[in-house]
Amino acid sequence: MPATIMRRNSRANSCVSFAPHKSAPVAALQQRVRMHHTMLTHRIAAQLEAQPLLNNTQLLNFEVRSRNIDWRRYVRPLDTQVRGSSVYLDAHMDLLSGHRRKVNAENQRELLVCHDMMGNYLADRHYHSSQKYDDYRFVHWSAVDYFCYFSHNYVTIPPSGWLNAAHRHGVPVLGTYIVEGSAGNQLLEELLASHESVYRAVAALTRLCLHFCFEGWLINVEHTVRESYMPKLYLFVDELRRATEAQVPHGRVFWYDSIIESGNLRWQNELNARNVQFFRHSKRMLINYTWNDTNLTTSELTVVGEAKPKQRVFMGLDVFGRNQLAGFQSAQTLARVASRGFSAGIFAPAWCYETLQQFGYDIRNEAGDADFNAAFLQRNEKWWSSIWQLLATHPYRRLPFYTDFGVGSGCGDYVRGTRHLRSKAYFNLARQSLQPSVPLHRNAEHSFDTAFVGGSALRVLNFERAFRLFLTDFELPLGVLLLGYAYKLTSEPEHQQLDIVLRLCPLRGQGQQQSLYLFCGDYAEHIITPGRCYLQPINGVIPGHLLPQQLPAEHGLLGEGWRVRYYVARFDGPVRVLDIGLKCRRETKMETETETETETETQSEAYLGAIFIQSLQLSDWTAVHQTTAANKALISAYHGALFTESASE
């Protein structure tokens, strides 16, 4: 770091007095959360428990325990504004690598994730789930285009926790209609008995989507179908797709490669003349998992012959294998898919979770286990990081932006750094916050030892260089930025340094080919230079209407060592925020052993508990000036030629 850039010394500024943290607002927030959860638990949580349908009587008669409940009160709608068009990242973890490859009609590939873990409908079926805080959690939504909740029951309805977590991140959710064995075949033949029975089933399945607030179906027929029933099976797929697309917001239907035109159960492992009719009716197909390069070629020729986009064909990868390189070798398989321009269907990513029992972990321990939790999270980040360059990443695009990094579980509940005295461990995916845009393998990890809000925070692992947290597409049309974040350092500030780093570019014109990095740390003054600016935090009160309720209006010390910082900057023109990253350093010390000296880092920890970004109005800029010391930043990015050339797009 340049010698001219100075950090504030907390001891030197000890004469600065901070208003004591008031406990009343925190207590009120804690009481509100506690009452909300208690009310739901006693009144309707039992009715909100997810359940599959096992036969056509239940399906056609709408025999679900929550039939009289307005599910929209408990499941957030699909958020179509939270994220933007996807891009490919060649160096997804490196904040200083601004290179993005734009997705277009020629290179677009999508990702379907099918979640199947030990039959599903485990603790996740409950609205409030359980106290097993180490249960399976999915957090890598930024690469996912469709999420399917899969079970081997006749009709699988996704639980509310998965719906809330996926919808918060802008990801549509599919249920599963599956036919297996002789019992399943009997149910299918009942459905296909007449045109009228087909239309009734289509109406019933569509009603389920609308009632439970999910977006469509994966159809999986894994039993031979009598040839006389095939015309009505095609009718069923076509009518279900039409009804879903017409009546269900953002509705989609997928067909799984199983039976062929004769009705025989023969997985083709490709799109070809024998199963293309299902592709025509469903518009999207998940190909069975044991394909080879010849199958890829046949699929390519078939889809080109159909004059349809290749990304509508999803080549399956079962993370457990099935005659493919999988597990931690999955990238080699997905690279073959990507090289042909097909989309991918990843089945059972909970492999990262389930296979840990091979190493002696008790994955069914209802009380949860800290060692197992840490092992799963590390393994999960490593696996997703290994395949990320083959996936497209959706940037967050809507302001205001807030997250506290909660994954939907915790060992306790925190509000502004203070733990509820009576809080217990919990697993509830409905409480998941917006997650980082990329895997954080070896850069940071979710920690359950402390939190600012909810049950977890990010613990920093990488103290060497800046790394990316969020890929963004935030527009600041007036060029006025408010940034706030909550952090915790376990040693004195002079021994640790933590910055949130923003990468900005001009809103228009040359756009992303130019960059300006803002380092928002504990600096004694603003340092404005081409390419990099170092900003001093606000010293005062931020008007409450500009902040989310999770953040206090004043900076300074909060519960259990947590602090908040705020920054307000005004540019001389509109700008776009492209990345949010983190840079953290800790003091090194020399240790002498006989005739040699070694340099080691201190063992102090750094945590990030929340982050908030907002685009302000000019009146807000004035309001901040009236309530804080005059240390807002005026940055002449355009007239001062501060934008510098970044990696070629």
Image (cartoon, grey):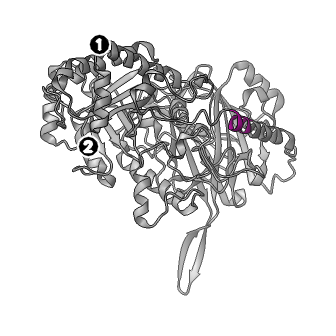
Figure check: 118 above or below 176: below
Q: Which residue is mark 2?
A: 335
Q: Quadrant of the C terminus?
A: top left
Instruction: Tell me which residue sits at (23%, 23%) in the image.
Output: 278
Instruction: Tell me which residue sits at (67%, 44%) in the image.
Output: 454
Instruction: Tell me which residue sits at (52%, 28%) in the image.
Output: 64
What's the residue type where badge 1 is placed? His
Q: Is residue 384 left or right of residue 544?
A: left
Figure check: 560 above or below 361: above
Residue 40 colored in magenta in the image: yes
Foreground: disc 1 or disc 2 = 1
Q: Is residue 447 left or right of residue 35?
A: left
Residue placed most toward the observer, 186 or 249: 186
Sequence-earlier tag: 1 or 2: 1
Q: Position of residue 69 (x, y in %)?
A: 61, 24
Figure check: 624 above or below 26: above
Q: Which residue is mark 1?
A: 195
Asked if residue 570 shows in the view, the reply is yes
Residues shaded magenta: 36-43
Residue 20 colored in magenta in the image: no
Instruction: Tell me which residue sits at (42%, 33%) in the image.
Output: 54
Q: Position of residue 608 (x, y in %)?
A: 63, 48
What's the residue type where badge 2 is placed? Ala
